[in-house]
């Protein structure tokens, strides 16, 4: 089944800043962003009590401690179980218009505008949108409405994701709502991470998996477990990804495969996007706001390499499914789109520079390129 998309997207490259590309009802007047990819290093931190397994917990466990509770959508905050709540027959409640045309994450101009090149990825994203009124009027009682409005102004896709998940039993469990900085600078990225898991698994069916990218771009490819991702553990170089590799590539987490490695990458991309729009309110000195996204792209490269060389039939099946090819390409471009903004805040990274070195090694990057049949750069745009 093809990706479902409801209005065209484009991207734009090479000039940081905001480009007024017009307004439309679908994005509430949010500007489309012009930005070029950046590979700047950053010092990363793992956040507090976030279910972002990668974060150094600076909350209840104290600075420097590692929270083991991540992505287990079935576990409550602070629990250390694996992702065991995995509804196989959840409702596929996309009553959105199905578009038979595959969306490659790059095609089409934004509605009513032609200044986003079709070979790039962009989406409404404005980290500098004014929110002073929301900060001044914040209270724990209006946390939910403030979250929706804050993200609607700065990152509409994130607002739609959380609005879709507001009835999830874990929604709101990852935030200390008593303080704006704790609720937004610390808790909100974890809310986005965990609610991505909730949306993806909640919209999966017996035969399809589901991936939320934006309200107008979601993927529903046929399920494919692939092989256990623990198979790549011994291939991971160095220790820059150890907090992720030791958690996700071993034990019960290590038994999860193809659908899960893409889902986890999706969650960490949303995690990073949220950090980029809440960085000014972060209560800690540094967090791993970029590390998870680049680590999972590196793991995806390793996974594809093992699939190609050791499981050729599986590799052929995955490569023959347009949604998977399109999603992998979109994740690469979209990750780089958000990296541009996250890189504006050195405190949003700990080991991401070293992880990027691994991710950009020619033999590793080539695995993504071979899978999507296109060369890539450290950019939200495809080389032309």
Image (cartoon, helix red, strand yellow):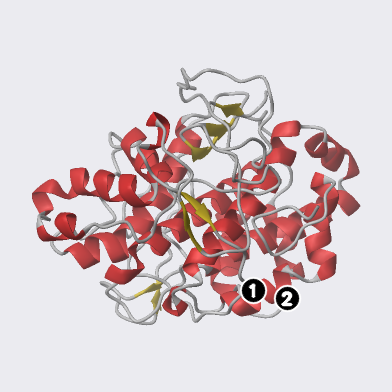
Q: Nearer the viewer, residue 247 or 2?
A: 2
Q: Seen in the image, is 41 located left or right of residue 75?
A: right
Q: Seen in the image, is 349 located left or right of residue 381?
A: left
Residue in view at x 11 percent, y 54 percent: 140
Residue in view at x 78 percent, y 38 percent: 318
Percent coordinates x, y for residue 47 in the rendering: 38, 70
| Residue holding disc 1 | 355
Percent coordinates x, y for residue 10 in the rendering: 61, 42
Of labels 2 and 1, the one closer to you: 1
Res. 258 in view: no
Instruction: Give the distance between the C-alpha atoms of the residues marked 2 and 1, in whole angstroms.
Output: 9 Å
Mark 2 surroundings: few (<14), some (14-19) or many (≥20) residues within 10 A: few
Residue 60, placed above or below residue 191: below
Mark 1 surroundings: few (<14), some (14-19) or many (≥20) residues within 10 A: many
- Mark 2 vs 1, N-terminal side: 2
| Quarter of the figure with the N terminus | top right
Residue 313, placed above or below residue 285: above
Q: Are circles 2 and 1 on residues that touch, CB within 8 Å?
A: no
Q: Nearer the viewer, residue 308 or 42?
A: 42
Instruction: Quadrant for residue 218, please give it.
Output: top right
| Residue holding disc 2 | 237
SS class, disc 2: loop
How many badges with numbers are in the image?
2
Q: Nearer the viewer, residue 73 or 146?
A: 146
Residue 242 numbered tag: none
Instruction: Quadrant for residue 231, please give it.
Output: bottom right
Residue in view at x 20 percent, y 48 percent: 146
Percent coordinates x, y for residue 206 in the rendering: 58, 23
Residue in view at x 46 percent, y 34 percent: 215
Residue 93, placed above or below residue 84: above
SS class, disc 1: helix
């Amino acid at each position: 089944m093809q990706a479902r998309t409801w209005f065209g997207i484009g991207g734009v490259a090479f000039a940081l800043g905001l480009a007024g590309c017009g307004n439309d009802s679908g994005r509430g007047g949010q500007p489309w962003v012009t930005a070029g990819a950046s590979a700047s290093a950053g010092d990363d931190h793992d956040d507090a009590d976030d279910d972002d397994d990668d974060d150094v917990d600076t909350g209840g466990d104290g600075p420097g401690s590692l929270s083991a509770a991540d992505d287990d959508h079935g576990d409550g905050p602070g629990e250390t179980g694996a992702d065991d709540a995995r509804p196989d027959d959840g409702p596929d409640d996309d009553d959105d218009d199905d578009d038979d045309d595959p969306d490659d994450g790059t095609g089409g101009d934004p509605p009513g505008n032609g200044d986003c090149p079709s070979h790039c990825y962009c989406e409404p994203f404005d980290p500098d949108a004014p929110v002073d009124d929301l900060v001044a009027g914040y209270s724990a009682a209006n946390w939910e409405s403030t979250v929706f409005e804050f993200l609607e102004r700065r990152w509409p896709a994130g607002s739609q994701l959380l609005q879709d998940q507001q009835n999830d039993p874990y929604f709101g469990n990852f935030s200390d709502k008593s303080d704006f900085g704790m609720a937004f600078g610390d808790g909100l990225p974890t809310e986005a991470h965990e609610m991505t898991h909730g949306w993806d698994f909640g919209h999966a069916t017996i035969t399809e998996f589901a991936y939320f990218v934006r309200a107008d771009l979601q993927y529903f490819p046929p399920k494919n477990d692939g092989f256990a991702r623990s198979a790549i553990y011994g291939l991971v170089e160095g220790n820059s990804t150890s907090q992720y590799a030791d958690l996700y590539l071993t034990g019960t987490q290590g038994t999860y495969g193809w659908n899960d490695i893409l889902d986890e990458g999706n969650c960490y991309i949303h995690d990073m996007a949220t950090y980029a729009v809440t960085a000014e309110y972060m209560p800690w000195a540094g967090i791993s706001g970029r590390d998870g996204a680049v680590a999972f792209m590196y793991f995806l490269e390793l996974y594809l390499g093992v699939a190609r060389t050791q499981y050729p039939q599986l590799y052929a099946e995955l490569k023959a499914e347009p949604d998977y090819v399109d999603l992998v390409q979109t994740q690469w471009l979209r990750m780089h789109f958000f990296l541009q903004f996250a890189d504006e805040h050195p405190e949003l990274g700990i080991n991401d520079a070293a992880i990027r070195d691994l991710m950009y090694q020619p033999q590793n990057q080539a695995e993504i390129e071979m899978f999507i049949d296109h060369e890539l750069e450290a950019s939200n745009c495809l080389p032309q």
